[in-house]
Image: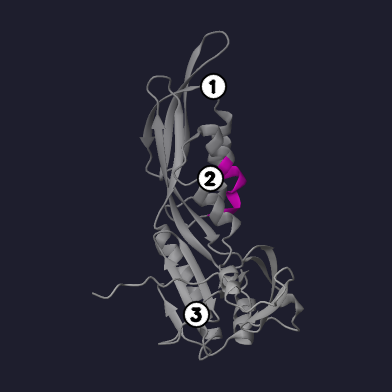
Amino acid sequence: MDEKKEVKEFTTEELAQCIPAPADLKAPFVFEVEGVPMVAKPVGRHSWEVTGREDLLQAPTRIKNFFLLFNDIESFCQYVKDYKTDSTNLYLTKSIKSLIFMASAVFNDIKRDQPNWRDQVAKYEPEKSIEWGDWNSNNKKRMSQIEFAEFLDEHIADIVGDGKRAPSAAEVLEAVTNLNDVRNVTFGSKVSLANGMASFVYTEKSPSGAVSEGHVSVPAEFLIGIPVFEDGPAYTIRAKLRYRIDRSNGELKLWYELQQLQRVFAKAMEAHVQKLEELLSGELPIYSGC
């Protein structure tokens, strides 16, 4: 039976052992590997320290691996046009579930029966807007009524009314003011009002010990109009109010839940895909869903 021999890839140092050396083994010598000068310096008997000196050449033997990240679509497409080759491909990474979108241009990509290094890459990842980041990072986050009021107050410009059930920014601002005025109280129950507001009943003790009862109203749902990506159009997103009253201490927790985020992100993402296809039409192959 024939023995199977293991074939391994030689390191540069091992390759140096196969290079005929000068008679004086104590002196360094120079050899080439694919046009790159290599300096072998003896460090012991039949042992060499090999250093590549590509820096001595007028230009590198090949383009080194590089990675560029763009957040401007026009600049990215112009760069792809300027540096594309017959081996350049564009890949679109789209994940509605994870809210991820990215375009990757591989300039030295593989072709059928033609291996390549695939290490020269430029990527385009549109920058998400500050508004999108703020509303998403606080989505479903439970807050005290004061924290909730402060958040809405800071982002009141993002709230838009629809002239119907969704309250206007002014109406939300009024609710925020009422929330800020109610402190050190015990909440007991919640009542849904016909005007789309949620009224929370509370009791308050004065310094003299007198107990009074009141209520504070906030929108049961509202609309925000924010862009997904910087410099992009605004999209309308519905936010539903959620709450919880701790029966042991009467503490009120409020939060909002943004509706159909994936659908909104998909719209914004497809707008970028269409723009990429428009700017790079006929320039190179485009593969989607990678």
* Overall secondary structure of the magenta section: helix
Residue type at tag 2: Val
In front here: 193 or 26? 26
Q: Which residues are magenta?
A: 151-159
Give the amino acid at mark 3.
Answer: Leu
| Residue situated in front as seen by the camera: 6 or 95 | 6
Task: Report the quarter where the N terminus lies.
Answer: bottom left
Q: Residue 171 placed where, x, y %?
A: 53, 46
Residue at 65% from the left image edge and 84% from the top image edge: 35
Camera-side residue: 10 or 102? 10
Residue 157 belongs to magenta span: yes
Give the labeled residue for mark 2: 172
Residue under the point 53% across and 62% down: 228
As measured in the structure, the alpha-carbon distance from the residue carrying label 2 to the one carrying label 3 is 46 Å
Tell which tag, 2 or 3, sits nearer the viewer. 3
Q: Position of residue 111 (x, y in %)?
A: 44, 86
Residue 16 included in the magenta stretch of the image: no
- Numbered mark located on residue 184 in the image: 1
Which residue matches tag 3? 90
| Above-or-below relation of 256 to 59 | above
The local secondary structure at tag 3 comes to strand
